[in-house]
Image: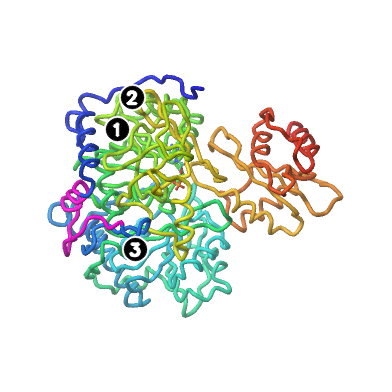
Amino acid sequence: MSEIQTKPVFKPNKEFAKTARIKNMCEYQALQDEAMENYEGFWGRYAEEKLDWMEPFNEVLDESNFPFVKWFNGGKLNVASQCIDRHLESRKNKAAIIFEGDRGDKQIITYLELYYQVNKFANLLKEDFGVKKGDRVVIYMPMIPEAAFAMLACARLGAIHSIVFGGFSAEALRDRIEDAEAKVVITADGAFRKTKPYMLKPVVDAALEGCEVVEKVLVVERNNEDVEWVAGRDYSYNELIKDKSAVCEAEPMDAEDPLFLLYTSGSTGKPKGVQHNSAGYILWAQMTMEWVFDVKENDTYWCTADIGWITGHTYIVYGPLAMGATTVMFEGVITYPDAGRPWKMVEEYKINQFYTAPTAIRVLHKTGEDEPKKYDISSLKVLGTVGEPIDPPAWKWYYEEVGQSKCAIVDTYWQTETGGHIVSPLPGATPIKPACATLPLPGIMGEILDPETGKKVGVNEKGYMCVTRPWPSMIRGVWGDPERFIKSYFGDVKKDDKAVYFTGDGAIYDEDGYITITGRTDDVINVSGHRMGTAEVEAAIKKHWNVAEVAVVGKPHEIKGEGIFAYVVLKSDNGVADEIEEMKIINSHIKQEIGNIAVCDDIVFAPGLPKTRSGKIMRRILRSIAKGEEITQDISTLEDPSVVEKIETMVKSK
Ligand code: WT7
């Protein structure tokens, strides 16, 4: 049965294509053919061309210990130098970072200034805190330039950063600190949101209670609110940075030395520390920046993500800086003071590429449909989306009103684990279709496979989105858990008897061979473009003393894409006196365990959960009930079939 209706096709803008790096589908195909025919030659060529090596590599790819692969063996380089030092000759006075604060305050940081700031930061970490190659440093920061300095300072020293999104709670922060055994935490007193100060340091204080591993905490003073200082542990960045030298040698790193960890949700309650290494990651970050956004020397590029997510890593900091671009960093909320804020910024900074999440587009569309018209946004050339499928009405508005029907929309499909885009249109080459990620990028052997046979699926048949050969920016490991690495990504699909990387997403080909991502095949849901493990939310709810059982599923949500829907069975059997009150209690528990991002949109206090006789919770039934769908499967074999009807009635009456 066909799931995809034929979609309209939009050809690339001819003027734009003339100067694009990849100008047409013939050029795309030639690159993809080159990679297929001579995979190592293809990657070796780019690694030599795009990266500055301190010592050359002597082998492109070592797969002998697959899936633990090595790219560019023998090569030495430093990622911070890739992002800064090598630009000093031709771009020292070019803006590297343009920062706009929440209250409209601005900073333009040139490549030379960035060089000095990062060197000083690295010297501080080294001299005052003893940070050295291989140490883990947790960064819990707002969207301020010091966050980027901190990342690059770690990279300069060879320390491994692990950024924890500022919306995570103290508990979640502690888990990540402990798992990575970080010896230093870099944070800020807080920052500003909607012109009001908010705090981060108190969360760090709570996370470190009883936590033995962290020796020092560095605090950037951003909002100058009062915070508590623990003597001998907490230090002010603003003070310590004053006397630091602006010169710091970059540590020569092996191509496969780890660059960072980033924790992400999986199908168990415990988040995974996704590990990315130096050379392969930075190579693909730079190549995708150049191909997918086609940023030119004088362009200004803006990605609205937070540095706490992979998009912020690859497409605010590492990718743009590796290619020597000007990247905009924004502290504020894009709908504040009104939904014209991003377009006002586009006008003011003459932004050429704008990259955001469908959730943001839906909000901007809903709350400020006519706002783009009020500003001169003619500088825009490429628009991007990331993180979740975009729905056609939001796409249409983005294309027509924001893109003025002349900008390509690149629907970039990728994940924390892939390091950079893997399936995406090329703005000067690929004819695009609304809400479709189109084709694998050159060099990426992306295929939709049948999990049973390992064969490529036919047109309109659902299959698993896989990558059949390792690529340079592929995840290198799950921190401290090699078993989980193998099991999570290489355990589900085999092609020609060889395990291949499985993304966890379902996908489908259309008649043109275009790929549409249909969503996760596991119990992971996508809330506002962020991955949320249902098991993680369940584990948080279960910690509440009065909860006997819980099952969490996703439910379509107008703005967020998916909302979180929980079925909770309470221990006390005297019913729920006040559902609203009880829901608040459960949600405040989630806020404490994970953070605001995991708060449930709906909670149903169920008399029981539908289970098989062997005790397995039937999530499929619960998903259908949450969506208000008819239940088609046979429920007569359940342990207690009557529970289904009871829950259905409860959900309907909500
Ligand atoms: C999951 C990865 C990629 C950076 C932000 C999220 C979903 C991602 C798309 C897209 C449809 C998408 C997938 C993927 N996803 N991009 N263009 N169309 N779905 O990173 O938290 O690692 O989540 O986001 O389900 O597996 P993440």
Structural crowding at the residue carrying mark 2, measured as other residues with C-alpha within 10 Å and reported as few (<14), some (14–19) or many (≥20): some
Structural crowding at the residue carrying mark 1, measured as other residues with C-alpha within 10 Å and reported as few (<14), some (14–19) or many (≥20): many
Residue 239, image x and y in percent? 37, 72
Of residue 30 and residue 497, the one placed in the foreground of this image is 497
* Label 3 to label 1: alpha-carbon separation: 36 Å
Give the residues in magenta: 41-63
Please determine whether, in this image, residue 130 is positioned above or below residue 303.
below
Residue 331, image x and y in percent? 41, 50
Q: Identify which residue is drawn at 58% across, 49% down.
A: 598
Q: Which residue is denoted by mark 1 in the rendering?
A: 380
Question: For the residue marked with disc 1, what is the amino acid?
Answer: Leu
Residue projecting furthest to the left: 89
Label 1 sits on a secondary structure element that is: loop
Label 2 sits on a secondary structure element that is: loop
Label 3 sits on a secondary structure element that is: strand
Return the disc, 1 or 2, that comes first in the chain's sequence: 1
Q: Is residue 42 left or right of residue 582?
A: left
What number is the disc on residue 249? none
Return the disc, 3 or 1, that comes first in the chain's sequence: 3
| Residue 125 shows up from this direction | yes
Question: For the residue marked with disc 3, what is the amino acid?
Answer: Pro
Q: Which residue is denoted by mark 2 in the rendering?
A: 404
Quarter holding the C terminus is: top right
Of residue 641 and residue 316, the one placed in the foreground of this image is 641
Return the disc, 3 or 2, that comes first in the chain's sequence: 3
Mark 3 or 2: the one toward you: 3
The image quadrant of residue 523 is top right
Of residue 344 and residue 20, the one placed in the foreground of this image is 20
Pointer 3 with pointer 1, Cβ within 8 A: no
Q: Which residue is denoted by mark 3 in the rendering?
A: 258
